[in-house]
Image (spheres, rainbow, N blue to C red):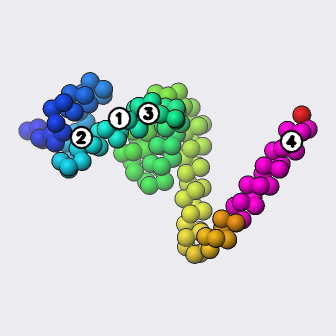
């Protein structure tokens, strides 16, 4: 027995034309958000935006890894492969995500002062800019 779809017939047709099918998981989106959810996915993930498909896929892989979602990890890894992302790049994206999650836990768990953190970050950015300018002057 097929589960009833929650999206409107027009949205179902658009999803099927775009993806070749209406994925079963989309049938579990609550009615008030069903068509809107497809629009978000379509426009941000598949649409032409400021980010390239490669960048979107790498972000997706990193976020999926950081939130430990096997569904999102699988989807975004496949998306990344479609965008010609190498296995080494996938591994790096996951490593970057894990580093961010690690330091986030450290900062939150130790209740670091946000104002101090912001000021230190500004100093670090200034220092890095100075190093870049000096390196460019060496060329």
Q: Residue at coordinates 75% horizontally, 58% vertically from top-left?
A: 124
- Whether residues under marks 1 and 2 lie with C-beta atoms below 8 angstroms apart, the answer is no
Task: Find the distance from the CA under tag 4 to the CA under tag 3.
Answer: 37 Å
Hey, which residue is sitting farthest left in the picture? 1
Above or below, comparing residue 54 to residue 32 in the picture = above
- Whether residue 86 appears in this view of the structure is yes
- Residue 35, which numbered label? 2
Helix, strand or loop: magenta stretch: helix
Which comes before the other along the chain, label 4 or label 3?
3
Q: Which residue is mark 4?
A: 135
Residue at disc 1, secondary structure: helix
- Whether residue 26 appears in this view of the structure is no
Q: Which residue is mark 3?
A: 79
Quadrant where the C terminus sits is: top right
The percent coordinates of residue 17 (x first, y second) are: 26, 24
Which comes before the other along the chain, label 1 or label 2?
2
Q: Which residue is mark 1?
A: 42
Tell me if mark 3 has few (under 14), some (14-19) or many (20+) residues whose alpha carbon lies within 10 angstroms of its own: many
Task: Find the distance from the CA under tag 3 to the CA under tag 1.
Answer: 14 Å
Kindly indicate the quadrant of the structure image that contains residue 78.
top left
Residue at disc 2, secondary structure: helix
Which comes before the other along the chain, label 3 or label 1?
1
Tell me if mark 1 has few (under 14), some (14-19) or many (20+) residues whose alpha carbon lies within 10 angstroms of its own: some
Q: Residue 119 in magenta?
A: no
Which comes before the other along the chain, label 2 or label 4?
2
Range of magenta residues? 120-138
Which comes before the other along the chain, label 4 or label 1?
1
Q: Residue 130 in magenta?
A: yes
Residue at disc 4, secondary structure: helix
The percent coordinates of residue 97 (x first, y second) are: 55, 51
């Amino acid at each position: 027995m097929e589960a009833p779809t929650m999206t409107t017939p027009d949205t179902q047709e658009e999803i099927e034309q775009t993806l070749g099918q209406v994925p079963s998981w989309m049938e579990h989106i609550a009615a008030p958000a069903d068509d809107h959810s497809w629009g978000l996915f379509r426009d941000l993930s598949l649409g032409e935006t400021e980010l390239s498909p490669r960048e979107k896929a790498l972000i997706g892989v990193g976020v999926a890894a950081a939130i430990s979602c096997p569904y999102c990890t699988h989807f975004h890894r496949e998306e990344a492969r479609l965008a010609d992302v190498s296995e080494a790049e996938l591994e790096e994206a996951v490593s970057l995500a894990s580093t961010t999650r690690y330091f986030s836990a450290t900062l939150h768990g130790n209740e670091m002062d946000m104002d101090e953190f912001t000021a230190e970050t500004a100093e670090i950015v200034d220092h890095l800019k100075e190093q870049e300018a000096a390196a460019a002057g060496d060329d």
